[in-house]
Image (cartoon, rainbow, N blue to C red):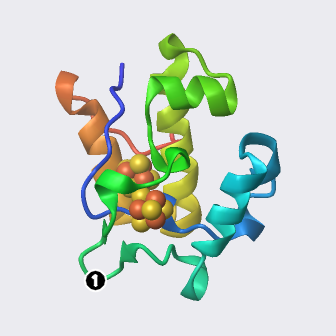
Amino acid sequence: MATWQCVKQCGACCHLDPTDRPELEEYLSPEELELYLSMVGEGGWCINYDRELRECKIYPDRPRFCRVEAEVFVEMYGIEAQDLNDFAIECCNQQIEGVYGLRSLEMIRFNQAIFEENGQVRIAHEE
Ligand code: SF4
Ligand code: SF4
């Protein structure tokens, strides 16, 4: 059992390059899509992402599509609350692998964090 959590100084999901996310139109409203595209900055990173500190500069006011919350995931992806944990872990795994790599420190730290509770540590996709 793994329990999803966001790890500090990752920011993989703040790499917004739309070419890596071809299905944006399927889960964003037209207004959100416009906002999303307006946030794509240099190298595909969100303009609100502080790349030095590796954190969101507008965290309390970040858009709905940046929030890992049960209500948001039902609305955007049709994912029910009981499936949120596994879905969010898979999203993070994909995003971290795409941005930093499967064997990156970010991936190791994420997996350490989500398996911390029961003392298990693994590298994603190696099982
Ligand atoms: S990819 Fe996951 S762990 Fe990394 S910043 Fe985003 S939500 Fe947090
Ligand atoms: S608004 Fe914040 S949380 Fe959302 S993608 Fe940009 S930096 Fe990341």
Up/down of 5 relative to 57, above or below: above
Tell me: is circle 1 under 8 Å from ligand 2: no
Question: Which three-letter amino acid code belongs to the residue tagged 1?
Answer: Glu
**Front-lying residue, 79 or 97:** 79
Estimate the x, y position of residue 54 in percent, counting from the top left: 30, 72
**Front-lying residue, 18 or 94:** 18
Residue in the picture at 62% in, 22% down: 79
Ligand 2 shown in quarter: bottom left
Up/down of 7 relative to 9, above or below: above
Quarter location, residue 107: bottom left
Residue 90 lies left or right of residue 12; in this view the side is right
**Callout 1: few (<14), some (14-19), or many (20+) C-alpha neighbours within 10 Å?**
few
Residue 114 appears in the figure? yes
Residue 108 appears in the figure? no
Estimate the x, y position of residue 41 in percent, counting from the top left: 57, 82
Estimate the x, y position of residue 98 in percent, counting from the top left: 59, 63
Dot 1 falls on a residue whose secondary structure is loop
Up/down of 109 relative to 112, above or below: below
> Given the current orientation, which residue lies at the most extreme top position?
82
Quarter location, residue 115: top left
**Front-lying residue, 41 or 5:** 41
**Front-lying residue, 45 or 107:** 45
Residue in the picture at 47% in, 24% down: 70
Quadrant for the N terminus in the image: top left
Up/down of 19 relative to 90, above or below: below
Residue in the picture at 30% in, 52% down: 60
Residue 5 lies left or right of residue 97; in this view the side is left
Residue tagged by mark 1? 52
Estimate the x, y position of residue 66 in percent, counting from the top left: 48, 50
